[in-house]
Amino acid sequence: MFHRENMLFKLFITAILVWLACLPLCFAQNIDTTSRAVRKEISRAMDVEKNIQERKAAWNEESTALSDQFVRLETEKKQLEKQLEKRWLLLGLEEKKYTENKRKQVETDRIRKNLSAYLDSVLIKLETHISRDLPFLADERQARINFLKEMMVDASESGAEKFRRIFEALQIETEYGATVEATRQTITFGGQSVLADVLRLGRISLFCQTIDQKKTGFFDKTKKSWVLLPKNVNSDMAKALSMARLERSIELVKLPLGRIVKQ
């Protein structure tokens, strides 16, 4: 009995010794496992920190780029706002110009229409006046009237040009009243066609004298024909023709101017 208990005790002691012998080994294994876990966590933490630093640097770089871009966009915004303001001012100015040009166009069309009607009436009066006037430069004056008639119906001619031409013709007709002219032409005098010298005194009187200076006459606007004058007028008429041709100095002559006819 005692021997059995002794054996059991020895086995117990042996087991304890074995356990104690194995305890450092187990403890060392646990420490090694823990160390590896700690190193792993530290490495992971370092990787995380490195990643964080890299992301932070990238974020700082991106933040700087975005900040620069923001400043640039703000500058562009201010420039665009100024340009937009100018555009609006320009648009307002163009609208005012458009409105003014439209008003001027309407006014121009009205003036052009009234001017055309006015010039037509002036041309009619001018043609009537020439038909009733003394018969001098008949071909030239009629050609001028014909030209003006054609021009008035020509759409390619501007109103300003028509106005200029009409009043140029009026000026020419007006100047006839302040000039003296001597010409030689064939006229119907005394029922015959004869070559005669014709003297125009403004548009007051028109005289004629045959080439042999034996007959002198004047144009009667009421009869629309040449009327024979007394022979005592022949000498003064010859002098007047010479003065009109600048062949002799100016002196007084007596010519019958006739009566004024109210048209």
Image: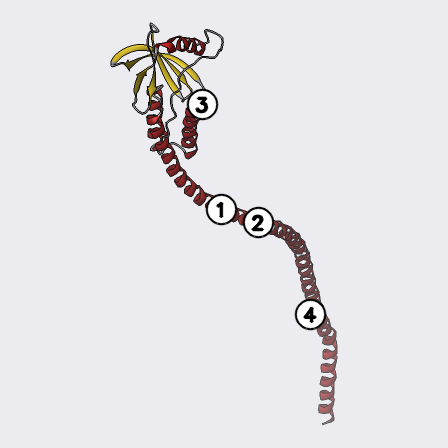
Mark 3 highlights which residue?
A: 175
Instruction: Judge by depth and name the residue closer to the eye, 7 or 170.
Output: 170
| Mark 4 or mark 1, whichever is nearer to me | 1
Residue occupying the far top of the picture: 212
Dividing the image into 4 quarters, which one contains the N terminus? bottom right
Hey, what amino acid is under mark 3?
A: Glu
Q: Quote the CA–CA distance across marks 4 and 1.
A: 92 Å
Residue 37: image location, x then y, percent = 68, 68
Q: Which mark is residue 98?
A: 1
Is residue 244 shown above or below 224? above
Residue occupying the far left of the picture: 191
For the residues bearing labels 2 and 4, Cβ distance under 8 angstroms = no
For the residues bearing labels 3 and 1, Cβ distance under 8 angstroms = no
Residue 40: image location, x then y, percent = 68, 65
Q: Quote the CA–CA distance across marks 2 and 3.
A: 55 Å
Instruction: Judge by depth and name the residue closer to the eye, 169 or 11.
Output: 169
Q: Quote the CA–CA distance across marks 2 and 1.
A: 14 Å
Q: Residues within 10 Å of mark 4 (few under 14, many from 20)?
A: few
Q: Earlier in the sequence, mark 2 or mark 1?
A: 2
